[in-house]
Structure formats: C-alpha cells, structure tokens
Image: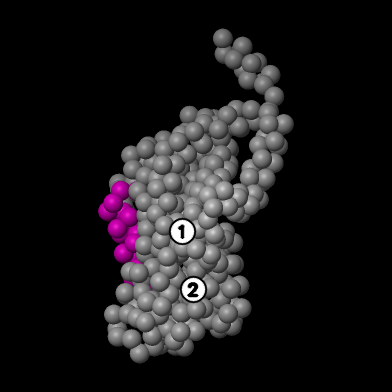
Amino acid sequence: MSTLTDIDRMSRRPPWGWLVLGFAAWIAAYASLIPVADSAIAALGLARETHLGEAVHFFFYDTPKVLLLLTGIVFLMGVVHTFVSPERTRAMLSGRRLGVGNVLAASLGIVTPFCSCSAVPLFIGFLSAGVPLGVTFSFLISAPMVNEVALALLFGLFGWKVAGLYLALGLGVAIMAGMVIGRLGMERHLEDWVRAMQSTTPAEYVGDTLHWAERVDAGVAHVKDIVGKVWPYILAGIGLGAGIHGYVPQDFMASIMGRDAPWWSLPAAVLIGVPMYSNAAGILPVVEALIGKGAALGTVLAFMMSVIALSLPEMIILRKVLKLPLIATFAGVVAVGILLVGYVFNLVL
C-alpha cells in the first residue's frame, strides 16, 4: 500500500501553470487597487476631496490590499513550512544573544513599506513559522514606522539629520520593545490556534520527501486555515480606520502640539494618534502641515509614530491572534518608546 501511495505521489505534476496564472492575477489585482477604489467612489457619486469620499476610497483601497498581502504571504509561509521546520526557524531567529533576532527582524521592516495593518499578515506568518514572539514584534513595530518611504519623505521634508535620527531612534524602539516583550514570556497570551500551530510540527512537513505538488497543496491549506480565521477582523479594523482617516482634525491637533505647549501635549499627541490609521506616505503631509502651523517636531513625530505603529484598526486585527493582555503590553511598551523618541527630538532639535 505504501508503495502505491509513493507512486501516486511521484506521478503528480506540480501545477506550475496554475501558479503562474495565480501570480499574474495577484500582480494585476494589486496594480489595480487605486483604479478600483477610484471607480468605486465614482460609482457611489462621491468626490475624493470630501471627508466621506476619502474615507470610502481608503476602505476600497486598503481592504483588498491587506487581503492580497495576507493571502500571498501566508501561501509562501505554508510552502516554506515544507522545507524548514518551526524548530529550525526558531533556532535561526531566536535572538537570545544580544537580540540578534530582534535586530534582523527590525532591519527587515526597513525594506517593507507597509502600514500597520499591512504588516500584520507577515507578523502572523512569522508566528505560524515558529519565530519567537519578541522577534515578530520587532518586525511589526519597525515595518510601518521605519521604512524607506518614511525615511525618504522625512529626508525630503526635513533633511538628513532628522531622517537619520528618526531611523536610529525608530529602530531602537522596535528592537528594545521586541526584546522586552520577548523577555516577559507572554506566549501564553497568544490565541490557542496560534499556539497550537507553533507548538507542533506541521503535518505536511516531512523534510525533502515532499514533491512540489504537495508543497503547493500545503500553501493552499495554510491560506484556508489562517485567512479563513482573520478576514472578519481585517474588515472591521480597516472599516474603522477608513472612517477616521477621512476626518483628520489638523487645526485642533496643531493647537495642542505647539513648541510652548505644556508637558502633557506629547502624551496627548500619542493618544490622539492611536485611533487614527494611515501609512507613512499618508501621514507625512499632515506632519508637514502641523509643523508649518508651529507644532514641535518631536511632538509631531511622536504623533506620526503612534498613527502608523499603534493604530486602533491594527489592534482589532491583532485581537484574532493575540489576547488582550499581550495587546495591552505591546501598546504600552511601544508607547513608552515613542514618548522617549518625542522628548529626545524636542530636546535635541
């Protein structure tokens, strides 16, 4: 019986044609995100310049973007599972000595220009592959907060000193926050389905004996399992973020972020930024406008960091993966780091 099974397995051809078509469709869908969102608000009779139109456009743009990223990344991680066991992945990125894993994960975030919700799919993929919790958080913090888009825009708006200081301090927050969370040993606050995925070697992993057709099947199964669990939270999170995105009160925020504002203005700016949702490219024009209205640079950058690294929509999506104590710890540790960055900027510049 085992011989027949082996023969049947070997006779299966890898579905390369379907993979190529699927990849081409994925690329085409991703490239069409903006035109589709434009067409959606046009069909609804809305103008992009209005608050409602901007919010609806954001929803129709970001929802398929995050779902496409999640599907693609989870599929790849499922295929990777068939080559590398979770135990080997843990060994490569454990970072127990001097936080090497945290440094690598935070550095990876620099070259992934994701907003906070878009970074969640890869965060989930890391967890499902057995990457240590603290290391995955270093990536989750760094990816939206410190990436080439943010650095390029900061360089263009404020010069290399501001961009360089932001890079150093942002990476410091991502690395140290990840190390602190890792040291706290909060794996028990992962949702049960994530812990089960981490603690057992996937059934499809049998080393080098699998054929490509089976590896592809494993990737598809991975997508069905993970995407099937988290997509409602993605819709809820992005829906909330879109509603807030269209109504950014620049004048109000500038009034409490001035250079002569009281000490509590910086924590207030961070709290105001948390309910909002944007990526670096979307929030930096707001940052420039606030600076032009006399707001303090450190306070405004702390506000920007909270928008792109601690957004409420991100927390809603993460709730499917993390229990509330771990979400609260993540938010608290990162908020402290952001406050320190803001005070350093206000002191130095």
Q: Quadrant of residue 295?
A: bottom left
Q: Residue at x 53, y 56 (%)?
A: 46
Seen in the picture, residue 168 relative to 12 is either above or below; the reply is: below
Residue marked by disc 2: 286
In the depicted view, which residue is nearer to us: 52 or 112?
52
In the depicted view, which residue is nearer to us: 268 or 13?
268
Q: Quadrant of residue 241?
A: bottom left
Seen in the picture, residue 111 relative to 82 is either above or below; the reply is: below
Q: Is residue 13 in sight in this rendering?
A: yes
Q: Secondary structure at mark 2?
A: helix
Q: Which mark is residue 161?
A: none
Q: Residue at x 48, y 66 (%)?
A: 145
Give residue 312's position: percent from left, percent from top: 37, 58
Residue marked by disc 1: 52
Give residue 20's position: percent from left, percent from top: 70, 37
Bounds of the magenta span? 321-339
- Of labels 1 and 2, earlier in sequence is 1
Mark 1: few, some, or many residues within 10 Å (few <14, many ≥20)?
some
Name the residue furthest front: 45
- Of badges 1 and 2, nearer the viewer stands 1
Magenta stretch, main secondary structure, is helix
> Marks 1 and 2, how far apart in space?
18 Å
Give residue 300's position: percent from left, percent from top: 43, 77
Q: Residue at x 36, y 41 (%)?
A: 195
Please give the count of numbered marks on the rendered protein. 2
Name the residue furthest bottom: 260
Mark 2: few, some, or many residues within 10 Å (few <14, many ≥20)?
some
Amino acid on which the number 2 mark rests in the picture: Val
Amino acid on which the number 1 mark rests in the picture: Leu
Q: Residue at x 57, y 59 (%)?
A: 112
Seen in the picture, residue 106 relative to 298 is either above or below; the reply is: above
Q: Is residue 261 left or right of residue 59?
A: left
